[in-house]
């Protein structure tokens, strides 16, 4: 499969904005000439495309909180990229080495279309670590997680429980902005997940918070959506770093679009503050 080098070609730029990252064949196939039936959903394609192009302009992730994987869970164990990622991550003894390993890793196609590798930031041993889904436009431009509108809301949420951004550790499951903020594929997620799990083990927070349903599904290996998962405490297995109290909350991007849910987000924040107090943090 050939990766598209979109920077040199405006058509490829358009395809990249639609989420196309690789060419499967040398020449396009005209499905109409083949006489294949047109799927009923094709009638809605222009609106879908318009939504996708609008999403390309949006700086936030995820597009919805109710996104579910349609695919089967990733059969990642045997995947070459996941294997390579695991070797690299295992060899990283501290965050700086992990950052360098990630920056030098070419096994995830998302990297080819992103401007930056958005590695997490914050102190080792931070009382709480927040993990989102993937960088949006602003994060990709700055090379830092949660610096756009979602990040601003996250900072306000932190302030509400007496924390400053620099007190906590903030990262994402995926360190590269997916083109047009599309949902990362299961294999892309599985590859990046290896790195963020190692990052969590190296940060060793007292409390881990998954921001949004997608991060919760990946980190906690659950199928249920955020509506069921939020507020439920689990023990996150951080390998040699032991078990960490972990919980999921609504993603700030979702709260920006659904302000009525801020009430429940506030309850979840209070629970985080209570757990930190229990852990002496
Ligand atoms: N949304 C995320 O999930 N992560 C970011 O860094 C920004 C927006």
Image (tube, rainbow, N blue to C red):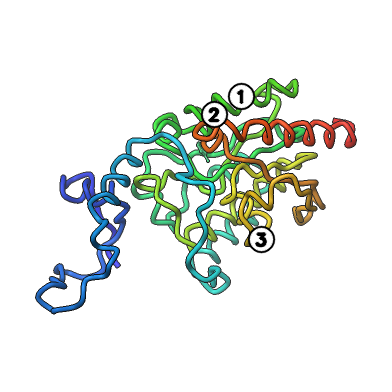
**Residue located 78% across and 31% down the image:** 270
**Quadrant (top left/top right/bottom left/bottom right) for the N terminus:** bottom left
Q: Secondary structure at mark 3?
A: loop
Q: CA distance from mark 3 to mark 2?
A: 25 Å
Estimate the x, y position of residue 276 in percent, counting from the top left.
Answer: 83, 34
Q: What residue is disc 2 on?
A: 151
Q: Nearer the viewer, residue 215 or 269?
A: 269
Q: Earlier in the sequence, mark 3 or mark 2?
A: 2
Estimate the x, y position of residue 122 in percent, counting from the top left.
Answer: 65, 31
- CB contact under 8 Å: marks 3 and 2: no
- CB contact under 8 Å: marks 2 and 1: yes
Location of residue 166 by image quarter: top right
Q: Nearer the viewer, residue 248 or 8?
A: 248
What is the number of the mark on residue 205? none
Q: Secondary structure at mark 1?
A: helix
Estimate the x, y position of residue 12 in percent, counting from the top left.
Answer: 20, 51
Q: Where is 264 relative to 133, above or below?
A: above
Q: Nearer the viewer, residue 227 or 23?
A: 227
Does mark 2's beta carbon lie closer than 8 Å to ligand 1?
A: yes
Q: Residues within 10 Å of mark 3 (few under 14, many from 20)?
A: few
Q: What residue is disc 1 on?
A: 155
Q: What residue is disc 3 on?
A: 222
Estimate the x, y position of residue 215 in percent, counting from the top left.
Answer: 59, 49
Q: Where is 104 relative to 147, above or below?
A: below
* Left/right of residue 38 with respect to residue 178 in the rendered view: left
**Residue located 53% across and 63% down the image:** 84
* Left/right of residue 63 with respect to residue 160 in the rendered view: left
């Amino acid at each position: 499969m050939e990766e598209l080098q979109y920077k040199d070609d405006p058509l490829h730029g358009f395809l990249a904005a639609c989420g196309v990252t690789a060419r499967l064949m040398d020449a396009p196939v005209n499905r109409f000439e083949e006489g294949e039936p047109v799927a009923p959903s094709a009638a809605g394609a222009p609106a879908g495309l318009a939504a996708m192009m609008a999403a390309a302009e949006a700086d936030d992730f995820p597009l919805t909180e109710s996104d579910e994987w349609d695919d089967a869970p990733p059969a990642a164990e045997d995947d070459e990229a996941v294997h390579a990622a695991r070797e690299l991550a295992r060899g990283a003894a501290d965050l700086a080495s992990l950052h360098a390993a990630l920056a030098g890793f070419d096994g995830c196609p998302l990297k080819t279309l992103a401007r930056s590798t958005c590695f997490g930031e914050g102190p080792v041993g931070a009382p709480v670590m927040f993990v989102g889904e993937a960088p949006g436009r602003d994060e990709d431009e700055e090379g830092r997680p949660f610096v756009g509108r979602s990040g601003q809301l996250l900072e306000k949420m932190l302030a509400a429980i007496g924390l400053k951004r620099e007190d906590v550790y903030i990262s994402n499951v995926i360190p590269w902005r997916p083109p047009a903020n599309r949902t990362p594929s299961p294999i892309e997620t599985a590859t990046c997940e290896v790195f963020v799990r190692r990052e969590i083990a190296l940060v060793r927070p007292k409390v881990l918070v998954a921001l949004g349903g997608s991060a919760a599904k990946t980190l906690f290996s659950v199928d249920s959506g955020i509506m069921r998962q939020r507020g439920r405490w689990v023990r996150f297995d951080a390998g040699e770093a032991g078990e960490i109290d972990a919980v999921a909350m609504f993603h700030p991007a979702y709260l920006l679009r659904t302000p009525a849910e801020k009430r429940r987000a506030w309850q979840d924040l209070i629970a985080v503050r209570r757990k930190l107090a229990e852990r002496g943090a």
